[in-house]
Amino acid sequence: MVLIGFSDTLSLAQSIGIVGTMILTLYFSKRQIQALSSDQETRVLNDLDEKFHNMAMLAMDDPSVAKVIDTRDYANKRETAFSFYVLWMCAHAFAMRQRKVLDDNEWTGWLQWMRNCFRRGIIGEIWKQIEPDGWFNPPFRIS
């Protein structure tokens, strides 16, 4: 029968402690890297959203510049330009929800706001006119 002395037990406990600490460090480092990657993606999306915001402001100020991206002649160009802006904002909120940036309460508020826009405004009609499959991310569908 083998007897394990106090110094052997202490040495074994130290080794287990060091290995456990290394495993925890690796686990939390991996989580931190994943969070950093998600933060970077969110920053890129927000930067693109800001660029779209500036473009939409130009299109709403002078609807004739929208011909650069869409040559169709819409009945009311100002309303269509503003509708693109609202729809892009909704699509951006949807993308943030997919990336888990928006929590359940925030998403519920956005979803209710979007539904109200479609129920009470003319954005639903414009949604059908603009053929959204060519303009928005395919998973972003409003029915």
Image: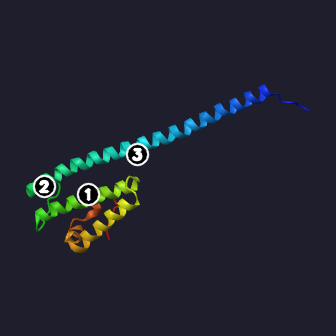
Residue type at mark 2: give it: Ala
Work out whether 36 lies above or below 141.
above
Badge 3 local density, few (<14 within 10 Å), some, or many (20+)?
some
Q: CA distance from mark 2 to mark 3?
A: 31 Å
> Does residue 41 appear anywhere in the picture?
yes
Disc 2 element: helix
> Furthest-bottom residue in view?
119
Q: Nearer the viewer, residue 55 or 74?
A: 55
Marks 1/3: CA–CA distance: 20 Å
Q: CA distance from mark 1 to mark 2?
A: 15 Å
- Could you tell which of marks 2 and 3 lies nearer the N-terminus? 3
Which badge, 1 or 2, comes first in the chain's sequence?
A: 2
Point out the image quarter for the C terminus. Answer: bottom left
Query: Which residue is label 1 attached to?
Result: 89
Mark 3: amino acid = Ser
Q: Nearer the viewer, residue 77 or 3?
A: 3
- Circle 1 packing at 10 Å, graded few (<14), some (14-19), many (20+), is some
Q: Which residue is mark 3?
A: 38
Q: Quadrant of the N terminus?
A: top right
Whether the residues at callouts 1 and 3 have beta carbons within 8 Å, the answer is no
Callout 2 crowding tier (Cα within 10 Å): few <14, some 14–19, many ≥20: many
Kindly tell me whether residue 68 is visible in this rendering.
no
Q: Secondary structure at mark 1?
A: helix
x, y (%) of residue 55?
17, 50
Q: Which residue is mark 2?
A: 59
In the image, residue 107 above or below residue 101: below
Front residue of 35/62: it is 35
